[in-house]
Amino acid sequence: MDVHNAFLHGDLSEEVYMKLPPGFHSDKPGQGKVQINVLIYVDDLIISGNDSAALTAFKNYLSSCFHMKDLGVSKYFLGIEVARNSESIFLCQRKYTLDIISEIGLLGAKPANVPMEQNHKLSSSTSPFFTKVEQYRRLVGRLIYLAFTRPNLAYAVHILSQFLHEPRQDHWDAALRVVRYLKNNSVQGIILRAVSDLNISGWCDSDWASCPLTRRSVSG
């Protein structure tokens, strides 16, 4: 839902507060209970829940309080694209990914097979300092947000984030390699299946004392 708010274009002198609509109260979800979740970003809302009638009543109540527009089933929100069928929901950031590649100027560059070299020495780099610090921070920040639907970027982003204060040329080159890796598959994302046992499967590959600075394991 999209809220048409005039107060977004000026300063408020009034007290602003929110209260639950009649018949609603905050509670922990449990079996047989109606649950409604509201995600709010400025004047845009995503509303979900386990009871369609309750969702309709809730949206009608909000519409009676504010000038709102129901945009229907969520398809795009904050750079995240949503596709669905009866079996699953697919989340990806294809346009956001292409925007990153275009902004850096690597649309014509050769794709990389992996986001980061296996035995990199970024922590001990002595290359010249990268002078465009804000550009480095912006790129890494965008990659952090992209990792929401691309968990395969987690390790590379974790490494690059360590040098936000004083990045060197090697760190910038490594960040560009991640961008070239994105060219391999810009539509990769996460599938949320309708039927799932909700069990989390994890694994560990400890790399004993691999960090050259702390001599500790990075992945384990």
Image: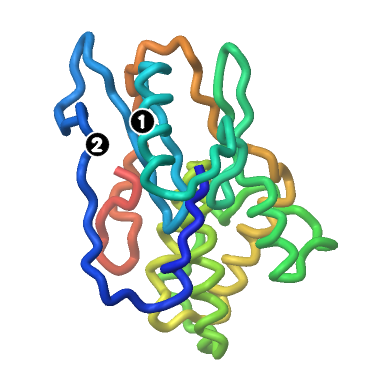
Amino acid type shown at disc 2: Pro
Q: Which secondary structure, mark 1?
A: helix
The residue where tag 2 is placed is 21
Q: Is residue 201 shown above or below 46? A: above
Q: Quadrant location of the C terminus?
A: top left
Kindly indicate whether the residue at mark 2 contacts the one at mark 1 (C-beta within 8 angstroms).
yes
Q: Residue at x 56, y 55 (%)?
A: 116
Q: Is residue 32 left or right of residue 192?
A: left
Crowding around mark 1 (Cα neighbors within 10 Å: few <14, some 14 to 19, many 20+) is: some
Q: Residue at x 64, y 66 (%)?
A: 176
The number of numbered badges drawn on the structure is: 2
Q: Is residue 33 left or right of residue 99?
A: left
Amino acid type shown at disc 1: Phe
Q: Which secondary structure, mark 2?
A: loop
Q: Is residue 92 left or right of residue 137?
A: right
The residue where tag 1 is placed is 58
Q: Residue at x 64, y 54 (%)?
A: 96
x, y (%) of residue 117? 57, 56
Precedes in sequence: disc 1 or disc 2: 2
x, y (%) of residue 111? 76, 53
